[in-house]
Amino acid sequence: METSYDYSNMTRDLAETFETISKGQHNLLSVIPIVGQATNYKHEWLEDVIEPTTDALDGAILEGDGTITVDDGTKFTADDILAFDGYDEIMRVTSIDGNDLTVTRGYGGTTAVDMADNTVIRLISRPKAEGSDPGYDAVSEPSAEYNYTQIFDRTAKISKSAVAGEHLVLDDIVDFHVKHHLELLQIEMNAAAIYGRRYANTGDATIPRTMGGLLYFIDQSGGNVIDKESAALAADDLNDLIEMIAADGGKPNVLLCNTYQARAISAFNLTSGSTPIVRTAWTDERTGGAVYEFVGDLPLGMVERIVVDTAFPQDKVAIIDTSKLALVPMRDRAFRDLPATPSAASDYVARRLIGEYTLEVRNALQGHGLIVGLATS
């Protein structure tokens, strides 16, 4: 019977095999879908931008002030109706000059009061009068984000003596080594999906380009990041991060951590007042407990499946939305298995595994979050 390796010049598509191997691992890559295709080494995608509906006072105000200063006046327009966290007063904007808003105090029968600096302002409505002309409201264009594709490559090399020999439980030693190298590529790509830095030297093609990983996109200014400054992880930290993500419109579903922080989360059960759900069966032959899911204390139905990845940094915990992540192969460049034996005179069989992929992290600053600086001892 002929096998696939009887055809020395045959190329095999390993895309589905790689996906199957990836799903069987217990790491970040196992929960990221492989979808779409990149059409350029610089892979771009569009992200919807929601117009902001909150701002803050830039300076305290007195009950008699007819002008208030805000952090960003571009968020507002005349006739906006404003509410203020911690106060019952409602205001109507009558005109705007930069970050200074002229307002009607005590709008709608509310009472004007003094307010503190940094009070959160909420844009509650933008009413229109009868017979008004069409408005030309500012439109937030979708923002463009990108990542570079990265080439992942390994070569399996097996002596012809090994190929000719009989091996217990191995029908095809070449195929065995190809699959083993594919597993190694999954581990390598998983590390790149965590730590990778987005880099391409367009002036020197001999320098390999690399794709940005999860930490590259999430751990940025303006993102949902909590710095614990070497303190231990607490349930409140996870709840606070979930709240931050929810406030930005996100709905995370996976908690990603290393073994140390996973044990810290399981230890929440020993602390009074902890709230995670423990899924375990108690029998005469079994004792102990582990946390497989973390349920935030916001009644929003957010359940974070815990994925323990030994490659993830010990001092960090990520809370992510896997629906906003994707592993994207370059068009016609998903993993494949190519003949790499130089000639018939070579006393070995070589197969090259090569693929080109990139990582999409959509809404990195809104849909995901990170706790950094955690204690590790």
Image (cartoon, rainbow, N blue to C red):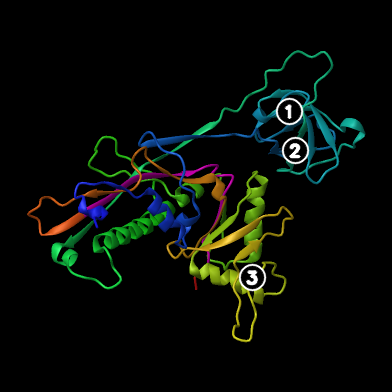
Q: Is residue 225 above or below residue 248?
A: below
Amino acid at pointer 3: Arg
Q: Which mark is residue 339?
A: none
Nearer mark to the viewer, of 2 and 1:
2
Q: Which mark is residue 122?
A: 2
Question: What is the span of residues highlighted in magenta in the rendered image?
Answer: 351-375
- Residue under the image location 73 percent in, 28 percent down: 101
Question: How far, Cα to Cα, is label 2 from label 3?
Answer: 40 Å
Q: Secondary structure at mark 1?
A: strand
Q: Residues within 10 Å of mark 1 (few under 14, many from 20)?
A: many
Question: How far, Cα to Cα, is label 2 from label 1?
Answer: 14 Å
Taking the view exactly as shown, the residue that stands out farthest to the front is: 1
Residue where numbered disc 3 is placed: 279
Mark 3 or mark 2, which is nearer the start of the sequence? Answer: 2
Q: Position of residue 371 (x, y in %)?
A: 55, 58
Q: Position of residue 148 (x, y in %)?
A: 38, 40
Please indicate, yes or no, whether residue 14 appears anywhere in the rendered image: yes
Q: Quadrant of the N terminus?
A: bottom left
Residue where numbered disc 1 is placed: 101
